[in-house]
Image (tube, rainbow, N blue to C red):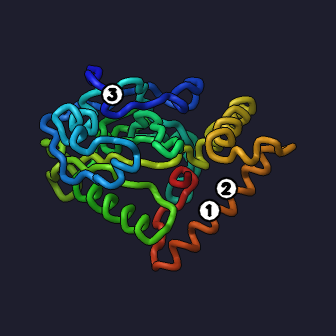
Amino acid sequence: MTAPSPLLPLGQGYASLPDIFHARVGPTPVQAPELVALNEPLARELGLDPDALRSEAGVDILAGNRTPEGARPVAMAYAGHQFGGWVPRLGDGRAILLGELETPEGETVDIHLKGSGPTPFSRRGDGRSSLGPVVREYLGSEAMAALGIPTTRALAALHTGETVWRQSGQEPGGIMVRVARSHVRVGTFEYLARQGEVEEVERLVDHVVARHYPELASEANRAAALFQAVRQRTASLVADWLSVGFVHGVMNTDNTT
């Protein structure tokens, strides 16, 4: 069902790329979504109306029960390593990219749902999240932002009104609404390159440079320049983490944007 008003007006930048980059799939509706937390200062920075997001229609959008106007939800494809072994096809197994939002400052950011249901990349998982990890990510990302460390941001945390089964038994279900400058992974490039999709790697380089590194557009070898910029930026990020005592437990290429 399409939302009746543009409470969350989104574009389709990444979703407009060829099908090899993603799987077209929408969020799975939940029974009784309820806001646990709404980041009102962030909402205002993004040009969104917090009161509208708190409305029934707004909560339905944040929970994945309604598709925002203009959105074409996708699960993003990427590869990476797990437990020391190469996995050629991972992808968003419990997350969906709703689309891109242009902020009042002219910046483009992703709106991403985590815990929004199964996708073709779920590998027999339920695609859901329990509420505990959602709250932890909300608090952790906002703490990093307050410390001035580059991070994803938390727009909202929701209880789904459902339960999920985990090793400890039944737990309340949750959905995280995440905001980021990009969800393109290092593993997205690997996913294409390991398949020999040279033209698609070049297409992804063009996409990332145009959106995130326009200053590299005139470089003779944009791919090499992009690699160098990402390497430096990642090293600086890890140094920032260590400066506050944070260590990433699974810093694989599928978890590195």
- Which mark is on residue 150? none
The residue at the far front in this view is 104
Q: Are marks 2 and 1 in contact (CB under 8 Å)?
A: yes
Which is more N-terminal, label 3 or label 1? 3
Instruction: Name the side, left or right, on which 41 lies relative to 238.
Output: left
Q: Between 155 and 50, which is closer to the camera in this rendering?
A: 50
Residues at badges 2 and 3 in contact (C-beta under 8 Å)? no
- x 39%, y 27%: residue: 25
Q: In the image shown, does 1 or 42 lie closer to the viewer? A: 42
Q: In the drawing, does residue 257 fall left or right of residue 173?
A: right
- State the SS at label 2: helix
Q: Residue at x 14, y 42 (%)?
A: 162
Q: Position of residue 102 (x, y in %)?
A: 48, 38
For discs 2 and 3, the disc positioned in front in the rendered view: 3
Residue at label 3?
Answer: 6
Q: Position of residue 212 (x, y in %)?
A: 63, 46
Separation of disc 1 and disc 3 at Cα?
35 Å
User: Observer-nearest residue: 215 or 156?
Assistant: 215
Q: Determine whether label 1 and label 3 are within 8 Å by CB.
A: no
Q: Compared with residue 148, is residue 211 higher up or lower down, i.e. above or below?
A: above
Q: Earlier in the sequence, mark 2 or mark 3?
A: 3
The CA span between labels 2 and 1 is 6 Å
| Residue pointed to by mark 1 | 234
Write down the residue under mark 2: 230
Assess disc 1: are there few (<14), some (14-19) or many (≥20) residues with their C-alpha within 10 Å of its C-alpha: some
Q: Is residue 125 left or right of residue 15?
A: left
Residue type at mark 1 is: Thr
Q: Mark 2 and mark 3: span between their CA atoms?
A: 34 Å
Image quarter hosting the N terminus: top left
Q: Nearer the viewer, mark 1 or mark 3?
A: 3
Residue drawn where x is 69% and y is 31% of the image: 200
Return the x and y of residue 80 as percentages of the image width and height.
56, 49
